[in-house]
Image: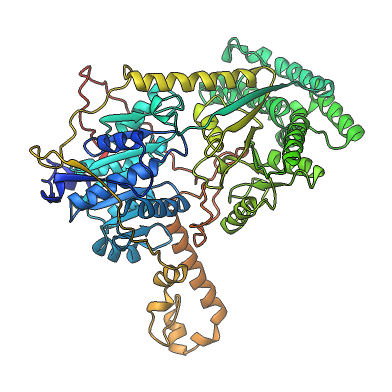
């Protein structure tokens, strides 16, 4: 806990950080890069409001943040400024952008993440004024007293669409609002949310009073946005796969028949994968008899989805897992195996086995379509003799591996490489280490291979240069996913996007994603569905109206700590006197003078202790889903388990929390200051 509830009771303290009234007479807009009117207008608003800035990828959100940081650095000489980003590589990327473009003195900044132990971060809080951190590291420094909330005057939040639920962004802002409400918030995102409710959640958690949003069609962006040409290809199943699909549906209908009351109106061909599982958790004790059937139905629905949208091999693997699990569970009464003994299930497995025996590896029609499209693309590029780069997005690692293998059959025209996260798969297959990820990015930039096949790691915060073509192997009905993928192209020239969708539900999901994005943009622009805060404090005197001063700022680059220095600062042996004994030693061992006779045991114990410290420290940060090839070379994170056994995920599993009781909201449109949940602190 950061503090007990008693220490948080009562009114907040007065504002400690006072403005320099002379410096406040003007605000500086750096001209170190060509002026863009939309950036100028957004910066002017962000200086005096808690602002949510939603700009398409590649249009300079970081420059906007740097301008605001520069002015608060000047206005409040004793105030501290934070730039929070969700991963360590993204933190490093923002350090470079802010100091190279806006003129914030590099000597005043520090990059504080889990790479530095908390005790090593403390001196920097006392000597520096600008901090680039992960939100987990910031919350920990609030907890241990390294950071004094009364000294903080500005918090910039990158990838603000993550600010929902109990994410560290929300914890940090809630705590700050209690201990020191006299600070400014700037929240940055390319995709604010999938619906108006999600955007409202960000507004509430970040205490937002103003929103600056632009889409690709905004009038003031037209001179800076390149066109993106999107083509959708509907890919039907082959007759052999249609036969497998029909058998799965027939088996699902048989299982569904006696439990239909729990899934009224469900269509076995389109029912969501998680719906049966969710219903099984809501059953009363009298209806628990339906749980096995519901769980089997959920697994079959997932296998059906894999068959239609992803990969025949993934479908087969899921059915084999279901059969193995069913074989291990026998009926308590009769001792019979349930699903495995069903003739329809046996017929399904037999059909799959015969198909594999006759054809070997079964290529999904989407993969064939993908290969055909890329052959056409690179053939046309070859005629023009210009290099081209392609990114292919898929949701599952096994699909990524299969796509890479299938495309590399066309070497040297198509040279594909996988790009996945660090976490190990459920089968124990290791992901790519961060060093390997950076090597992949560098090789891609150097055109050593021309096709990067990615999981979700490639969707957000990735700087890999210009990409000519994006291919979405599968689609999502969530607009954030779709927009993050599409945002990888069209930055320096017109971009092209190909979306492969299966007939039926996936085709509908893609249409929903596009419609949802348009609805969210309209809801934010209209403002009729959002309630903003209107209690935002004016941090400089009301009598002062700063005038703009446009000028080129001198650049003082930021010099990061070396990797070796970071490692030494947290190491136990560095602070030990000569001849000191490492690890736990019993009194008997000391009396007998036999410490040196057991170096192996002592060494092992010390290594275990240090490893635990490293894990605890790195726990400040989420795993690294985003990479910057030039700036992240010294960062290494532990391997984290995946939340979902199939989807690519790089975030550590979150602790389960008891559901909170929702209080009735007032009809008063004035948004009150949020009351923190003191139990969290």
Task: Work out which quarter of the rendered image holds the C terminus and state it.
Answer: top left
Q: Nearer the viewer, residue 343 or 575?
A: 575
The residue sitting at 75% across, 19% down in the picture is: 251
**So how many labels did they put on this image?**
0
Toward the left, the furthest residue is 543
Depth check, front residue: 657 or 335: 657
The answer to whether residue 578 is visible is yes
Q: Residue, x 9% and y 37% (percent of image)?
A: 542
User: Which residue occupies 86% across, 26% down?
Assistant: 351
Residue 620 visible, this angle: no
Residue 168: percent from left, percent from top: 37, 44
Residue drawn 76% across the image and 33% down it: 376
Indicate left or right for 356 with 394 as reference: right
Q: Residue furthest top?
A: 265
Q: In this image, 503 relative to 86: left or right?
A: right
Compared with 436, 277 (above or below) is: above
Q: Residue 602: give x, y in percent of width and height.
A: 51, 77
The residue lying furthest to the bottom in this view is 593
Task: Give how far across and how far down residue 424 sits, in percent.
Answer: 62, 50
Q: Is residue 216 left or right of residue 423?
A: left
Judged left or right of residue 245, residue 113 is left
Which of the 4 image quarters holds residue 230? top right
Picture coordinates of residue 47 (x, y %)?
Answer: 24, 39
Colour setting:
rainbow
Camera-side residue of 393 and 360: 393
């Amino acid at each position: 806990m950061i503090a007990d509830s008693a220490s948080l009771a009562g009114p907040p303290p007065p504002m400690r950080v006072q403005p320099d009234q002379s410096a406040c007479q003007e605000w500086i807009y750096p001209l170190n890069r060509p002026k863009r009117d939309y950036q100028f207008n957004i910066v002017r608003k962000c200086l005096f409001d808690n602002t949510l800035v939603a700009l398409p990828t590649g249009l300079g959100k970081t420059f906007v943040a740097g301008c605001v940081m520069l002015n608060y650095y000047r206005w409040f000489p004793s105030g501290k400024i934070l730039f929070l980003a969700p991963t360590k590589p993204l933190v490093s990327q923002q350090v470079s952008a802010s100091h190279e473009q806006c003129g914030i003195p590099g000597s005043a900044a520090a990059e504080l993440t889990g790479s530095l132990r908390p005790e090593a971060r403390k001196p920097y809080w006392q000597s520096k004024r600008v901090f680039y951190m992960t939100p987990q590291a910031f919350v920990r420094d609030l907890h241990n007293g390294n950071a004094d909330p009364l000294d903080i005057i500005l918090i910039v939040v990158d990838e603000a669409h993550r600010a929902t639920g109990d994410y560290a962004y929300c914890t940090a802002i809630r705590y700050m609002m209690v201990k020191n409400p006299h600070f400014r918030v700037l929240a940055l995102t390319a995709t604010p949310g999938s619906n108006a409710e999600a955007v409202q959640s960000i507004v509430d958690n970040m205490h937002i009073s103003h929103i600056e949003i632009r889409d690709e069609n905004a009038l003031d962006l037209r001179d800076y946005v390149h066109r993106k040409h999107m083509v959708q290809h509907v890919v039907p199943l082959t007759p052999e796969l249609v036969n497998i699909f029909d058998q799965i549906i027939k088996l699902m209908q048989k299982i569904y028949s006696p439990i239909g009351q729990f899934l009224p109106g469900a269509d076995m061909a389109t029912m969501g994968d998680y719906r049966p599982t969710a219903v099984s958790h809501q059953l009363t004790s009298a209806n628990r008899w339906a749980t096995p059937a519901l769980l089997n139905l959920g697994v079959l629905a997932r296998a059906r989805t894999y068959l239609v949208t992803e990969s025949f091999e993934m479908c087969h693997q899921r059915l084999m897992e279901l059969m193995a699990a069913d074989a291990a569970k026998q009926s308590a009464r009769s001792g019979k195996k349930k699903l495995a003994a069903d003739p329809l299930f046996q017929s399904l497995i037999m059909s799959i086995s015969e198909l594999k025996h006759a054809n070997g590896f079964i290529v999904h029609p989407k993969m064939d379509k993908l290969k055909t499209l890329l052959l056409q693309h690179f053939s046309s590029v070859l005629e023009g003799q210009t290099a081209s780069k392609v990114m292919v997005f898929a949701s599952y690692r096994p699909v990524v591996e299969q796509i890479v293998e299938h495309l590399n059959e066309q070497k040297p025209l198509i040279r594909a490489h996988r790009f996945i996260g660090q976490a190990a798969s459920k089968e124990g297959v290791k992901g790519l280490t961060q060093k390997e990820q950076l090597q992949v990015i560098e090789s891609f930039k150097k055109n050593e291979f021309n096709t990067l096949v990615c999981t979700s790691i490639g969707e957000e915060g990735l700087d890999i240069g210009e990409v000519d073509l994006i291919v979405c192997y599968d689609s999502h009905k969530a607009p954030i996913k779709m927009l993050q993928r599409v945002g990888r192209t069209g930055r320096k020239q017109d971009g092209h996007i190909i979306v492969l969708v299966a007939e039926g539900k996936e085709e509908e999901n893609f249409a929903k994603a596009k419609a949802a994005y348009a609805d969210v943009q309209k809801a934010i622009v209209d403002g009729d569905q959002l309630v903003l805060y209107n209690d935002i404090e004016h941090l400089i005197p009301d009598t002062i109206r700063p005038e703009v001063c446009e000028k080129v700022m001198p650049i003082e680059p930021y010099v990061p700590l070396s990797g070796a220095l970071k490692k030494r600062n947290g190491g136990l042996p560095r602070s030990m006197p000569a001849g000191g004994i490492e690890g736990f030693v019993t009194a008997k061992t000391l009396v007998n003078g036999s410490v040196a006779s057991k170096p192996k045991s002592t060494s092992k114990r010390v290594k275990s202790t240090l490893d635990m410290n490293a894990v605890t420290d790195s726990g400040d940060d989420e795993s690294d889903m985003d990479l910057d090839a030039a700036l992240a070379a010294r960062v290494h994170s532990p391997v984290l388990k995946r939340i979902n056994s199939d989807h690519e995920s790089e975030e550590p599993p979150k602790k389960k929390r008891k559901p909170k009781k929702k209080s009735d909201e007032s009809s008063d449109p004035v948004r009150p200051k949020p009351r923190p949940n003191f139990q969290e602190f």
